[in-house]
Image: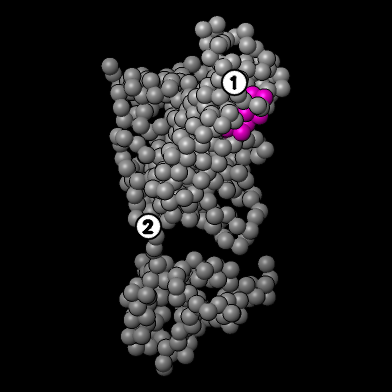
Amino acid sequence: MSAASNNNDKPSLDRTLQELHNCMDIFHRMFPGKPELHIVYFSNLVNMDRLHHDLVAPLASAAGNEQIAAILTQEHSLFVAAQDHHTCVNGILAGQAAVFFREEVYLIDLLNSFGRSIEQSETETVIAGPHDGFVENITDNLTVIRRRIHSAQLKTISLQVGEVTKTQVIVAYIEGIANDELTNKLIERIRGIEIDAVFDTNMLVQMIDDNPNSVFPQFLTTERPDAICSKLTAGRVICLVDGSPSAFSCPTSFFEFFTSPDDYYQRWQLGTALRLLRIIGFVVTIGFTALYVSITTFHYEMVPHTMLLNLTESRSRVPFPPLYEALLMEITIELLREAGARLPTKIGQTIGIVGGIVIGQAAVQAGFTSNILIIAVASSAIASFVIPSYIMSASIRLIRFGLILLAGLLGNFGLAAGICFIVIHLSGITNLGTSYLTPLAPIAKKDWLDTFIRGPFYALRSRPSQAQTSNKVKNKMRK
């Protein structure tokens, strides 16, 4: 690079002020009797107490240029020299103050930290175990992780995403446990994102998916620090996004969305029972209403004779085919669910409970639907809440509508074809190049102890095969 090019990139006061013009909150401060000294910062980003204590007071009390230079260049100083104009402007935008002295520019971090305090996640509550959760401040989120993992091998890499927002993203992993190839692949994907703005973790993961058109989430996002720390020690890589109260881990398998930190804070027998219950809930929520539509449309012979009379009597007043009837009630349930989520908490709970009871009872009495369908729709809705991941639960609810349509058009054949399509689709999904159905496809039986069941801790000796770690042993406990 030529000398002229270096001079053009060199930070200067005039160029900085010109780029930041028409910003009402930019502040340019000068010192009487010190014409070579200037400070530029955003008044609403910096901490004013720290600004006065760490910057203004020492520079104002300096007797001459020699003392000013000594303050800015002393060893272990808070001031960092900005080598180019881009670094200078980005530093000011990130909450740093720029000190222009003679031909040099120095940055000092005075960011005013604000936001809510660390508290329990509202979407991922647990009965036993820690009750802290991530917040919107990325520094606080990294702090709660390091408070749990006191290891020098916990490495962090800072990246930047968004041409306009310049959102900070931190990739973290445990050196010697995480797979280097998977870590580098994740970093390269994040660096390759070209977009104006990223505001949340759930936005970022959609930009680095292997299969962006799939309805299934491919990265496990969570607001719980303990869950993220367990992923780190298992050999996975995690990522934090500034401004987002959640983090994600990878590589991720489909079955991870059915696990909860609660499983490990209770006896293993109870944890296993809860996991099996969630799998049953998954089957119920995608298939129960569709099976009702299939039976009442094409396959009455599947109903026991003792129930057939009740079923025909219940449907005798309904003027709609079972397909229309089911879609009407499912859409109503989704409307109630969405209304309850958007309204204030106390009102939302009232709308969900009272609205569901009143509308369901009125629909039966008016002949719009049958009693048995109300039971099927309500059971499917309740079963969807058993799944710990809200994003996976929402995806499964959407799939349910497709299965209802197939069951209404083709009966049991359509229902079976829809389930086969889901299995084939899941088999084709990958996450950072690893199989989404691990440890079922490919089969890794040793991982089943911590997938379909929650085995006792002494039996959980190995890290998951999907992490592809060379350090496989994590537990040497004896019975």
Q: Residues within 10 Å of mark 1 (few under 14, many from 20)?
A: many
In this view, the residue in front, 198 or 67, is 198
Q: Is residue 53 something one can see in this rendering?
A: yes
Q: Is residue 307 above or below residue 381?
A: above
Q: Which mark is residue 323?
A: none
> How many labels were placed on the picture?
2
Which residue: 44% across, 54% down? 136
Determine contact: label 2, label 1, CB under 8 Å: no
* Vertical arrangement, residue 219 with respect to residue 367, above or below: below
Quadrant location of residue 108?
bottom left
Q: Residue at x 65, y 12 (%)?
A: 299
Horizontal and vertical percent for residue 152? 37, 44
Q: Which residue is mark 1?
A: 315
Choose between 365 and 206: the one closer to the eye.
365
Q: Amino acid at mark 2?
A: Arg
Q: Is residue 204 a member of the stretch shown in magenta? A: no
Within 10 angstroms of label 2, few (less than 14), some, or many (20 or more) residues?
Answer: few
Quadrant placement of the N terminus? bottom right
Q: Which residue extends farthest bottom? A: 33
For marks 2 and 1, give the one nearer the viewer: 1
In the picture, measured across the screen, residue 231 lies left or right of residue 392, that is left
**Residue corresponding to mark 2:** 116
> Where residue 167 sits in the image (x, y, percent)?
54, 57
Q: Indicate whether residue 324 is drawn in magenta.
A: yes
CA gap between label 2 and label 1 equals: 53 Å
Residue 146 left/right relative to 96 = left
User: 258 or 172, which is in the foreground?
Assistant: 258
- For the point 48% across and 45% down, the residue is 341
User: Magenta segment, which residues?
Assistant: 321-330
Disc 1 is placed on an element classified as helix
* In the image, farthest residue toward the left: 479
